[in-house]
Image (tube, rainbow, N blue to C red):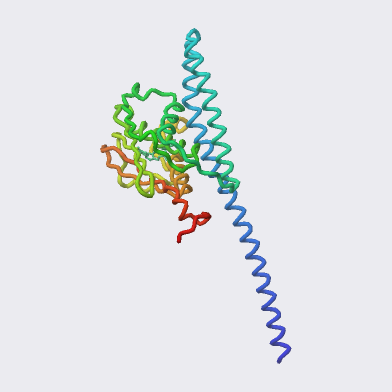
Amino acid sequence: MLTRIIEKRLSLHKRLTNQQQQNDALQSQFTQLQALANIGTTTCMVAHEINNLLTPLANFAALSLKNPDDKLLSEKALQKVVRNCGHASRIMESMLAVANGQTQEKQSTPLAALVENVFTCLCRDFAKDGITVNVQIPKDLTVLAIPVQLQQVLMNLILNARDAMLPRGGVLTIKACDTADAVQIELSDTGCGIEPANLEKIFQPFFTTKANRESPSQHSGSGLGLFFVKRVIDDHGGCVSVESKPAGGTTFKITLPKPLPEFLRSDSNVKLV
Ligand SMILES: Nc1ncnc2c1ncn2[C@@H]1O[C@H](COP(=O)(O)OP(=O)(O)OP(=O)(O)O)[C@@H](O)[C@H]1O
Ligand SMILES: [Mg+2]
């Protein structure tokens, strides 16, 4: 009788150990698959951001080729190529670091200069599209951010606002202010607005209303811009929200936390008495 009980216990123990080994193997496979999925998303996002920088360059270069005698235009095009390429390689470095799990240092970043840089990278005169740009950012306002990532966040929001106002034109307003514990950035446009049913979907990857159904090869949106925006702002410990009405324009609000004062930081040497 006792022998049978012992045998049963041994067999149960063996089954449990096997089960445990299978669980461990599945867990490790799951972790590997998660890492692969992460690389996939990051690759899509890198491609998307590089494309944001290359598209205006291609347009500018084509314009310059059409006007070979315009030396000034050619020089300008080449300067833009050099600048945007440098920026593109910084984006790649920054995003690959994210994919490799490396933490990047946030820096105190002047916001007005960052916004100005976005418009320079876009190489496009918004006035030609009938869009008035109204920037209200105090010159000395800084945010704690990874500059190359925050610049791409702003670029995505500005490109979306432009798309929403074409072809009629409108007003794009970019404001920022400093509160006690955060910096708030607001981008408003007077464009087509967002349907209420779509509001909760816009931050999902690959959600776009810009797909060209008649000619899928020419579709203009991949639905990755806002997914990127949310991911970067979340990684910065901030939040992003949206208010919009169909035909009533759209406002995106970003809140970025300010660093804690030195005496409240856990790594601080300053002690309260
Ligand atoms: N300012 C805006 N006004 C109106 N609709 C907007 C605005 N911003 C975003 N949207 C809506 O949200 C959707 C998702 O935006 P998102 O930037 O993620 O992708 P996309 O612009 O379609 O493509 P892309 O990957 O090229 O950015 C858009 O297709 C559009 O329907
Ligand atoms: Mg977009």
Rendered-image quadrant of the C terminus: bottom left
Residue at point 36%, 46% (across, down): 241
Q: Residue furthest front?
A: 273
- At which x and y percent is residue 122? 44, 27
Q: From the top left corner, tell me how far across and down residue 233 is, in percent.
A: 44, 45
Residue 159 figure quarter = top left
**Disc count in the image?**
0
Q: Quadrant of residue 213?
A: top left
Left or right of residue 48, residue 255 in this image = left
The one nearer the camera, 246 or 264, is 264
Q: Residue at x 68, y 70 (%)?
A: 18
Q: Is residue 253 left or right of residue 76?
A: left
Which quadrant would residue 132 be assigned to in this image?
top left
Q: Ligand 1 quadrant?
A: top left
Q: Is residue 142 at least partly visible in the picture? A: yes
Can you name the residue that lies furthest to the top here?
A: 69
Above or below, 251 against 132 in this view is below
* Front residue of this view, candidates 220 and 117: 117
**Residue 35's spot in the image, x, y percent?**
59, 50
Query: Is residue 213 among the parts visible in the rendering?
Result: no
Residue 66 drawn above or below residue 89: above
- In this view, the residue in front, 216 or 131, is 131
State the residue lying farthest toward the left.
Answer: 248
